[in-house]
Image (tube, helix red, strand yellow):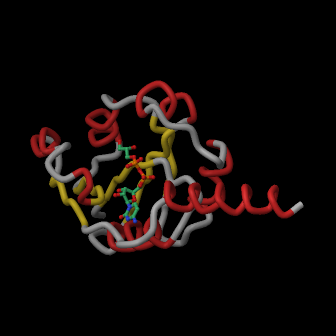
Amino acid sequence: MKTIITYGTFDLFHVGHVNLLQRAKALGDRLIVGVSTDEFNLNEKGKTTIVPFEHRVTVLQSCRHVDLVVPEQSWRQKVDDIQKYQVDIFVMGDDWSGKFDDLKTFSEVVYLPRTKNISSTALKQAMAVLSQLHQELN
Ligand code: C2G
């Protein structure tokens, strides 16, 4: 049983997330996803989400590539998670390339190419523009 783990916010779940999860799962038999809590996002990543934590958990649990969803509450928990779940491969998109190489002591580390032309940030910006247009037209 080869176990894979990855982490993220997964706000406004989109095809870039799906592509990452699908490729991560294809590396093994079980995929665990650490979903950033709202507090972790705000305090450690300095970002807020459109979709609250509980809903982001539910969305990920409904994804066929995902076997287990756990909360991501700190940067430091990755080593504990890797040992607790006997993880074989830690996976992230390559915007994080090199940032988690310290985990190579505990598991294989793989960075996968990001999906181009889609991001939660871009979706939020598009929503803000549409909302502004709507207000101006009404
Ligand atoms: N991703 C991707 N392609 C995109 C957008 C995102 O492959 N177009 C990947 C990211 O590289 C990441 C995962 O999808 O591996 C989740 O992306 P985010 O929700 O943006 O996660 P992030 O805010 O980078 O948080 O401890 C790690 C952090 O929690 C990662």
Q: Quadrant of the N terminus?
A: bottom left
| Near-viewer residue (131 or 52) | 131
Residue plotted at (29% across, 68% down)? 28
| Rendered location of residue 69, percent (x, y) | 51, 50
The single residue placed furthest to the right in the displayed view is 138
Residue plotted at (19% across, 43% down)? 100
Ligand 1 falls in which quarter? bottom left
Q: Quadrant of the C terminus?
A: bottom right
- Looking at the rendering, which quadrant does residue 2 occupy? bottom left
Residue plotted at (48% across, 47% down)? 9
The single residue placed furthest to the front in the displayed view is 136
Give the left or right position of residue 19, taking residue 83 as reference: right
The single residue placed furthest to the left in the displayed view is 105
Residue plotted at (72% across, 55% down)? 132
| Rendered location of residue 129, percent (x, y) | 65, 59
| Rendered location of residue 26, percent (x, y) | 32, 75
- Looking at the rendering, which quadrant does residue 125 occupy? bottom right
The single residue placed furthest to the top in the displayed view is 43
| Rendered location of residue 12, percent (x, y) | 59, 58
Give the left or right position of residue 103, taking residue 27 as reference: left
**Total number of numbered labels?**
0
Give the left or right position of residue 55, taking residue 13 as reference: right
